């Protein structure tokens, strides 16, 4: 019968219309500016730098300015300059750490390649602006956010990272202690085997 | 000429509604014999609501009949291949998300397969199953949206697309909670996947799979038997099987023309040989068949998802020996391809032993499928050209790269 | 499974004069390819498609590769007259020569009917500047039509016998072939706040000379 | 109406409103009406266009902001959402669309590509930001921005519209006679588009980078 399919279709739309008043499966609108979306833990937008202490974020950055992320960033939106003292010796922290959010594609590769867990992905997405140049170029003071904040947005990952860093620190300390003990022991009787302490791993701040 | 897949049961080939069951004439009009009358040349696009992006067709019309049609490409040519040659192997992975931006998961997978071939990497079994789950979710997402867009082109403005996007959001929520991003997942890695899915996530997938069947029933109730849609799409844009094969057409469009060619069966990559599914094949090769094949494929995807979820083994999802950063494959080349929702998506990589590929080539299914656009549109009205283009299922990010 | 050697033998049996060389592939993929001479390309392609035992009915992928000029060092042995009366001394010297680059077009063929493939065909041009034509395989496989146009557009390979050889991705008045390795892109590096590598070199032209030390807009 | 010193500050106005006194100037009424009927152009470029469509669909429902009327013709649109990568081949068309839109018109650059070329910035056929040719009102970074981020950008734009004075030098373009609203359309040249940016529309601040050392 001609028209049966049409009527069937109209029944479907009618079902959806009525359903949208009582069935949450059919009424899916989120009232965005009033109701904030429930972001999943994994959600990522732009990177930020993890700092240990809220009172001195720039002094306690985990970043050691090794520039791996700068090199690996596919769209090249990271710019790092190592902080150096008067003699030119590296202070192992960034003097300049810029991320151009007008280029960043939120791919998370900087997070994956960072050996120091210093850069992580933020979840702030309400960043529309009318300023083209400087507002979109984030400097290290804007990027530095505390570990507490990291725990708030990615609790599982942050707990993992903290546990790993603590374990590494402990292992490093024990190794240093053992090396010192071995040195002290070997210094007196026979200076045969020069202690060859492996360089301490990641200088965990 | 071609043996349809033996696994495809006859029921998959059944046309739900025979074209003769209603009184409308198909809209295909033979081109005028004498070529009399004035010809009109118009340019559809690059800004046109029905060209699925910045695609342009230069159409020559006799009255309302298309007598010549030349596609114009390049309005979204963003140099994907050139950038791929300047980026490391890992760095190209997020770029593949942006090729066919509806289906980032399958693009990732195709690229990962190509690199795994090039570097000789193996993939843990759990990762293979996770890849199947994600690829089939992507297929559901793509085909649902395509049906919505196609109906938009037919003139049902809004409603089917609205329903399609409602379901798409549910799949995107899953992608987002797994990979962190709605569209640009950047999830696959060489030798596995980036994140291990949690049991809660797998339960959410199972729940979605359970409700997708009823949604498809409703969607089909709305569209499949609709007389206007049948009148508009049946007999329009017929693609003969021989031409489809010769013109490199792949994916649902090839299968709608009656060729049972599906890389999941032919190449048997991943764990597809262990899963049981049928390959739907069309009989007429028209727009309606292309729609129908996709709907049937979604039904098979649901079954595939159920099997993959049930058989998902434990273990790691990423080969710990596989190098991601600083991968330097031996000099040589590899071509890896998978059955994406739009057809055969392949990556051809040439390595010269350095950290960046010497040549990085994407074989884009929708670009090659467009080869037959003119053949399909000749003799039809300009309104039919729009739905023929819609049924080819193009995404400009992939056509122009 | 057809091996390239097997396909090569069949081709040589059918076309005795043709040059068909196996190009080995060093990667674990192990997919070797066949380099065919331009003179017989169209015949060979037709044979590959129509011969029932081969039936490569679909050309899936067509692409170009730009191989730059390579510096090759040959070791040449010269014999020089040695000490008077003694035997001549063999002196080895290294001779540098430039192996001219060429453009290469790669075709990936599959057989849908026999579920076989891929057979990878390669065609090479004479050099990168003047002798850049190869025969078009579009008359054999329609799928080459747009892909060969793309290779023409981005690499500058001229396909003789192509029905509609125009630029496809770039606009018509464009003159460069941007996928070539020696392509120089236009200079629009006015605002590059995070440059390094090549981009830094290119962007530096646009930076004003620092007037006073420490004058930056970073801090 | 005195431009330099408004009779009431906005705090005083809010206070009066709380006390139940409704004070509305013509300007406020006019801008309120304009800001809640911003009709975008139905124009998608790339990936971000999908998120723009998603924003207009049931879940995010841009109709709550009065912007659900996506017009296929630039003659009927108020807002150009540049949603995706603008290639050099496409740039003249985008500028022409902008010129065809009637004043008052606004432009949102949605996503990294529209702002600066984004991840494809170094490509030979990619325009490094649509603001090289069109004055952009709101930039929404992200790749792609979530639909909520687009809605947030739209709210910012509405606030901007509400803050526009009707007279004086800060008045919107359509109320001034001195400002031409047409942007020069670039030409497709032999190697690049010409010019590579419109001098009157775009100029970058001078940039001194510290040495990498």
Image (tube, rainbow, N blue to C red):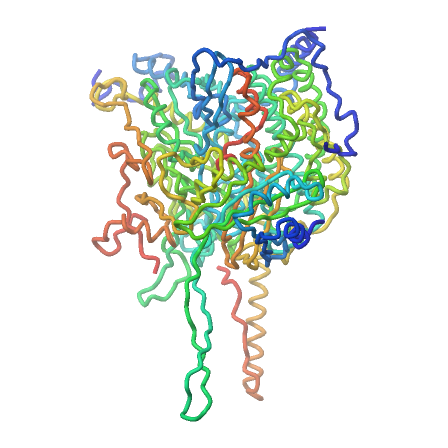
The answer to whether D19 appears left or right of A8 in the picture is: left
- Of D5 and D14, nearer the camera is D5
- Residue at the location (55% across, 49% down)? C122
| Residue B73 against residue C41 in the figure, above or below | above
Classify the position of the N terminus of chain B by image quarter. top right
- Residue at the location (53% across, 55% down)? B351
- Of D74 and D159, nearer the camera is D74
Q: Position of residue B98 (x, y in %)?
A: 51, 38
Is any part of residue C219 visible from this angle? Answer: no
Q: Quadrant of residue C176?
A: top left
Q: Residue furthest bottom?
A: C85
Is any part of residue A152 visible from this angle? Answer: yes
- Of D57 and D130, nearer the camera is D130
Q: Position of residue A115 (x, y in %)?
A: 52, 57
Q: Position of residue C113 (x, y in %)?
A: 70, 38
Q: Position of residue B331 (x, y in %)?
A: 55, 58
Q: Quadrant of residue B133?
A: top right
| Residue A80 against residue C112 in the figure, above or below | below
């Amino acid at each position: 019968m001609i028209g049966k399919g049409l009527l069937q279709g109209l029944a479907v739309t009618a079902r959806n219309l009525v359903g949208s008043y009582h069935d949450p499966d059919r009424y899916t609108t989120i009232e965005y500016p009033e109701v904030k979306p429930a972001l999943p833990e994994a959600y990522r937008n732009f990177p930020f730098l993890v700092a240990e202490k809220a009172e001195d974020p720039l002094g306690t950055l985990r970043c050691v300015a090794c520039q791996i992320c700068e090199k690996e960033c596919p769209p090249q939106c990271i710019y790092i300059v190592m902080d150096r003292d008067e003699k030119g010796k590296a202070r192992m922290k960034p003097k300049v750490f810029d991320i151009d959010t007008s280029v960043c594609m939120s791919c998370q590769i900087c997070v994956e390649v960072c050996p120091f867990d210093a850069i992580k992905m933020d979840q702030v997405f309400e960043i529309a602006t009318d300023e083209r140049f400087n507002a979109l170029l984030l400097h290290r003071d804007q990027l530095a956010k505390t570990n507490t904040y990291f725990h708030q947005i990615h609790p599982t990952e942050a707990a993992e990272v903290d546990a790993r860093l603590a374990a590494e620190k402990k292992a490093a300390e024990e190794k240093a202690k053992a090396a010192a003990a071995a040195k002290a022991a070997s210094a007196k009787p026979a200076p045969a085997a020069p202690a060859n302490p492996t360089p301490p791993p990641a200088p965990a701040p | 000429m071609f043996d349809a897949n033996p696994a495809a049961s006859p029921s998959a080939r059944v046309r739900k509604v025979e074209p003769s069951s209603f009184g409308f004439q198909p809209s295909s009009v033979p081109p005028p014999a004498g070529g009399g009358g004035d010809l009109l040349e118009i340019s559809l696009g690059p800004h046109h609501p029905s060209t699925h992006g910045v695609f342009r067709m230069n159409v020559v019309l006799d009255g309302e009949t298309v007598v010549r049609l030349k596609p114009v490409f390049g309005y979204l040519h963003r140099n994907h291949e050139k950038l791929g040659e300047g980026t490391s192997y890992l760095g190209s992975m997020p770029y593949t998300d942006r090729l066919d931006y509806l289906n980032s998961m399958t693009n990732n997978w195709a690229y990962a397969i190509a690199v795994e071939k090039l570097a000789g990497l193996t993939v843990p079994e759990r990762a293979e199953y996770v890849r199947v789950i994600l690829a089939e979710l992507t297929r559901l997402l793509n085909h649902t949206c395509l049906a919505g867009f196609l109906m938009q082109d037919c003139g049902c403005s809004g409603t089917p697309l609205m329903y399609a996007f409602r379901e798409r959001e549910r799949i995107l929520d899953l992608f987002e909670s797994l990979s962190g991003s709605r569209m640009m997942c950047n999830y696959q890695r060489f030798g596995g996947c980036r994140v291990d899915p949690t049991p809660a996530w797998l339960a959410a997938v199972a729940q979605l799979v359970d409700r997708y069947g009823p949604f498809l029933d409703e969607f089909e109730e709305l569209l499949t038997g609709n007389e206007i849609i049948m009148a508009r799409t049946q007999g329009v844009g017929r693609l003969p099987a021989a031409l489809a094969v010769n013109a490199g057409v792949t994916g649902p469009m090839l299968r709608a023309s009656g060729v049972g060619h599906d890389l999941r069966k032919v190449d048997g990559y991943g764990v597809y040989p262990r899963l049981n599914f049928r390959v739907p094949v069309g009989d007429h090769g028209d727009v309606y068949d292309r729609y129908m094949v996709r709907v049937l494929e979604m039904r098979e995807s649901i079954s595939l998802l159920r099997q993959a979820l049930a058989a998902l083994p434990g273990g790691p999802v990423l080969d710990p020996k596989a190098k991601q950063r600083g991968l330097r494959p031996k000099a040589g080349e590899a071509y890896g391809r998978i059955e994406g929702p739009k057809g055969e998506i392949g990556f051809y990589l040439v390595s010269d032993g350095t950290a960046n590929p010497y040549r990085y080539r994407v074989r884009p299914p929708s670009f090659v499928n467009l080869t037959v656009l003119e053949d399909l549109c000749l003799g039809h009205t300009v309104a039919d050209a729009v739905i023929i283009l819609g049924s080819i299922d193009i995404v400009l990010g992939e056509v122009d790269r | 499974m057809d091996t390239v050697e097997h396909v090569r033998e069949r081709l040589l049996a059918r076309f005795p004069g043709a040059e068909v060389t196996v190009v080995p592939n060093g990667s674990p993929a192990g997919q070797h390819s066949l380099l065919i001479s331009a003179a017989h390309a169209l015949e060979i392609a037709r044979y590959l498609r129509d011969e029932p035992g081969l039936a490569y009915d679909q050309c899936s992928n067509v692409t170009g590769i730009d191989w730059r000029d390579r510096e090759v060092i040959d070791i040449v042995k010269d014999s020089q007259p040695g000490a008077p009366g003694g035997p001549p001394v063999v002196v080895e010297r290294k001779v540098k020569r430039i192996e001219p680059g060429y453009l290469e077009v790669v075709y990936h063929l599959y057989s849908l009917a026999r579920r076989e493939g891929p057979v990878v065909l390669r065609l090479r041009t004479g050099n990168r500047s003047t002798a850049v034509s190869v025969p078009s395989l579009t008359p054999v496989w329609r799928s080459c039509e747009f892909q060969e146009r793309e290779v023409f557009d981005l690499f500058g390979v001229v396909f003789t016998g192509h029905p509609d050889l125009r630029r496809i991705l770039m606009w018509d008045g464009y003159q460069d072939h941007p996928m070539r390795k020696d392509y120089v892109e236009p200079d629009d590096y006015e605002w590059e706040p995070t440059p390094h590598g090549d981009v830094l070199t290119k962007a530096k032209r646009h930076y004003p000379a620092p007037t006073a030390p420490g004058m930056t807009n970073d801090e | 109406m005195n431009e330099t010193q408004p009779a009431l500050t906005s705090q005083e106005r809010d206070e009066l409103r709380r006390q139940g006194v409704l004070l509305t100037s013509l300007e406020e009424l006019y801008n309120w009406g304009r800001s809640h009927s911003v009709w975008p152009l139905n124009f998608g470029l790339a990936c971000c266009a999908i998120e723009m469509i998603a924003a207009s669909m049931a879940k995010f429902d841009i109709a709550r902001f009065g912007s659900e009327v996506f017009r296929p013709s630039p003659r009927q649109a108020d807002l150009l959402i540049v949603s995706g990568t603008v290639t050099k081949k496409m740039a003249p068309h985008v500028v022409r669309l902008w010129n065809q839109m009637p004043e008052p018109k606004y432009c949102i650059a949605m996503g990294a590509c529209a702002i600066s070329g984004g991840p494809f910035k170094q490509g030979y056929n990619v325009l490094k930001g649509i603001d090289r040719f069109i004055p952009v009102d709101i930039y929404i970074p992200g790749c792609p921005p979530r639909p909520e981020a687009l809605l947030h950008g739209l709210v910012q734009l509405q606030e901007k519209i509400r803050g526009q004075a009707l007279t004086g030098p800060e008045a919107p373009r359509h109320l001034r006679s001195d400002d031409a609203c047409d942007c020069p359309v670039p030409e497709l040249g032999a190697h690049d588009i010409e010019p590579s940016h419109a001098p009157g529309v775009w100029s970058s601040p001078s940039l001194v980078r510290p040495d990498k050392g």
